Amino acid sequence: MLIESVDRARLEVSPTLDPKRRSKLGQFMTPGRIAAFMAGMFENMPTDVRLLDAGAGMGALTAAFVTEACRRADRPASITVTAYEVDPQMADILDGTMQACEDRCAESGITFSCQVIRDDYILRSAEPLLAHSPAFNCAILNPPYGKINVSSEWRHALRSLGIETVNLYTAFVAVALNQLEHGGELVAITPRSFCNGSYYESFRRQMLDTSALLALHVFESRKTAFKDDDVLQENMIFHVRKGTPQAEVALSTDAAPARAVPFAEIVRPNDRHAFIRLPVDGDGLAARVQALPCTLVDLGIKVSTGRVVDFRATEHLRKMPGDDTVPLIYPTHFDNGAIRWPVPESKKHNAIADNPETASLMVPGGVYVLTKRFSAKEEKRRLVAAIYDGGRVGFENHLNYFHENGKGLPMDLARGLSAFLNSEAVDQYFRIFSGHTQVNATDLRSLHFPTRAQLIALGTGETTMADLV
């Protein structure tokens, strides 16, 4: 069968690809079962389909779409595919897949035509004759993953299209939405990271302002979607229709069937950042966290990212402390809610030189609550907090630290804050609210907290998390 044939080619070819080039191009080939699932999400296929497959790879998504179209009772009369693929090796295989799609359509009486464009999708789309011209009524995408540098050709091309974003995958989706006609449907598999954070706010607003969100499918395991590749991103599939009113959203996971969720639970009406929440477990503890009364501003607490970027301060790093150093705290120093320092067996440094060149990297001595910016795969919780209590210190850039105007916190408040951040309730909240393994300071500023008095009571043991949420 068509999909199975493409999937076999993926399994044979994928391990032979140059890892460095693959990483540069953000290539992760769509498994057949995922491609079939995505194709099945399209609702009413037009009589004459004009399909976009940008970053087509070997053509698994188009093959799945064609297979789905051919099996439907209300099959289209024609399918015209425009497939972009910049990698010559992939494009050669893609040509063969398109021929197989034509043969499959002929069996079902569907007229098929295709154009394989061996070019960069973003740069080609920004050319004057193609820019701002809706040309498709269906789009199916597994876009590449990769950061976009400020000075890159991609950034300039996107700005010419009125698009501001920081990653190739959101760039591909944004350009595709521009090229989709009114009522057209788009289905894409991407990382979850666009759901929150300031870097992706412009993209979220474009998508939500121009399209209705029809369905979200969340892969709760990092390896479910691309288990044959070394992919650390947490992935999701989303389905949108351009230019139509927003209704309920079908929310599903790889462990649970779809259920209808009010859009207001996905994007809260009063959320000025338009974060996309993924309430895969329903309401429960996470909703009660969201209902708590305070933000960090209300508490008089601030959160900042650690100032020490180690590769920029290499000459000042010390393996072990000495007379002219201060502690340097990394995530590796976390130990069951506290800081264990120094760690002689660690590959990381334990100290940083104390001199005029490093003065701006230091934080005054005191009590600070630290959180890891990245959760490791083996950790049970998304958010991991610990208390630092000591003298003048440097916090490495993979940490966030809570403080009061640059100085430490009262110990009872710090204990309560740490207990709250390490709780099951906040973990559930972040699994809905945070779509990726990184926990930014912006995410923490958006979190709701108990009152200051309640946090102190939690720190002294006078109350418990069960009393608060």
Image (spheres, helix red, strand yellow):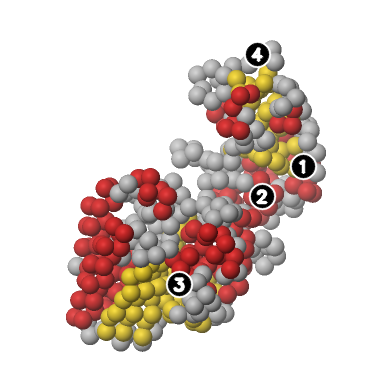
Q: Locate residue 462, reporting x and y percent.
A: 73, 35
Quadrant assignment for the N terminus: bottom left
Per the rendering, the mark at residue 322 is 4
Per the rendering, the mark at residue 158 is none
Residue type indicated by callout 1: Ile
Q: Can residue 238 be seen in this snapshot?
A: no
Q: CA distance from mark 2 to mark 1?
A: 13 Å
User: Considering depth in this image, is 377 or 8 the residue closer to the camera?
Assistant: 8
Per the rendering, the mark at residue 442 is 2
Which residue, given by chain and number where applicable, does mark 3 sit on?
186
User: Considering depth in this image, is 427 or 117 the residue closer to the camera?
Assistant: 117
Which residue, given by chain and number where applicable, does mark 1 sit on?
301
Q: CA distance from mark 3 to mark 2?
A: 29 Å
Residue type indicated by callout 2: Thr
Residue type indicated by callout 4: Gly
Q: Is 286 on the left-hand or right-hand side of 214?
A: right
